[in-house]
């Protein structure tokens, strides 16, 4: 969020509209693709966007776990999760 965007947010309710504005478009996404994505997000509504975020979060976690398993095929499930915790939070877990 740029300085201009921050100044536009006077009310916390406006925060989401600023985040979803085209000024927040990913640098590697064309304006045309961003417009399509915006229309799709609008079509699925807040609940759909929430469910999509949950699915994407779960997918990211699955990829992270797969990476630990790839690097440490000898680990048990508990060891995989412990290593994931170490990687995510940079600390030793019991």
Image (cartoon, rainbow, N blue to C red):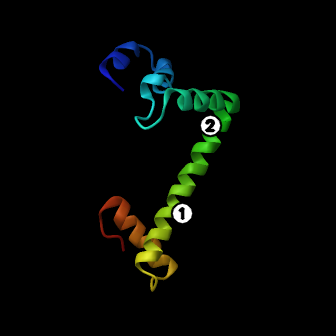
Quadrant of the rendering where the N terminus is positioned: top left
Residue that lies at the very extreme toward the bottom in this rendered image: 74
Q: Secondary structure at mark 2?
A: helix
Q: Which numbered circle lies on residue 46? A: none
Q: Residues within 10 Å of mark 1 (few under 14, many from 20)?
A: few
Q: Which numbered circle lies on residue 62? A: 1
Residue 66 placement (x, y as % from top left): 50, 69
Residue 72 placement (x, y as % from top left): 42, 80
Residue 50 placement (x, y as % from top left): 61, 39
Q: Is residue 16 left or right of residue 41?
A: left
Quadrant of the rendering where the C terminus is positioned: bottom left
Residue in the image at 57% along x and 44% along y: 53
Taking 45 as reference, is 68 above or below it? below
Residue in the image at 37% along x and 60% along y: 88
Q: Nearer the viewer, residue 76 or 22?
A: 22
Residue in the image at 48% along x and 18% along y: 14
Residue in the image at 61% along x and 30% along y: 36
Q: Is residue 47 left or right of residue 58?
A: right
Q: Which numbered circle lies on residue 49? A: 2
Q: Residues within 10 Å of mark 2 (few under 14, many from 20)?
A: some
Q: Nearer the viewer, residue 51 or 35?
A: 35
Q: Secondary structure at mark 1?
A: helix
Q: Is residue 70 left or right of residue 56?
A: left
């Amino acid at each position: 969020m740029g300085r201009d965007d921050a100044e536009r947010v006077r009310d916390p309710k406006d925060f989401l509209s600023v985040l979803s504005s085209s000024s927040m478009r990913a640098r590697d996404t064309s304006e045309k693709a961003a417009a399509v994505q915006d229309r799709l997000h609008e079509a699925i509504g807040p609940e759909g966007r929430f469910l999509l975020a949950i699915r994407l979060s779960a997918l990211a976690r699955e990829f992270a776990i797969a990476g630990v398993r790839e690097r440490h095929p000898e680990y048990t499930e508990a060891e995989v999760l412990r290593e994931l915790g170490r990687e995510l939070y940079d600390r030793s877990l019991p």
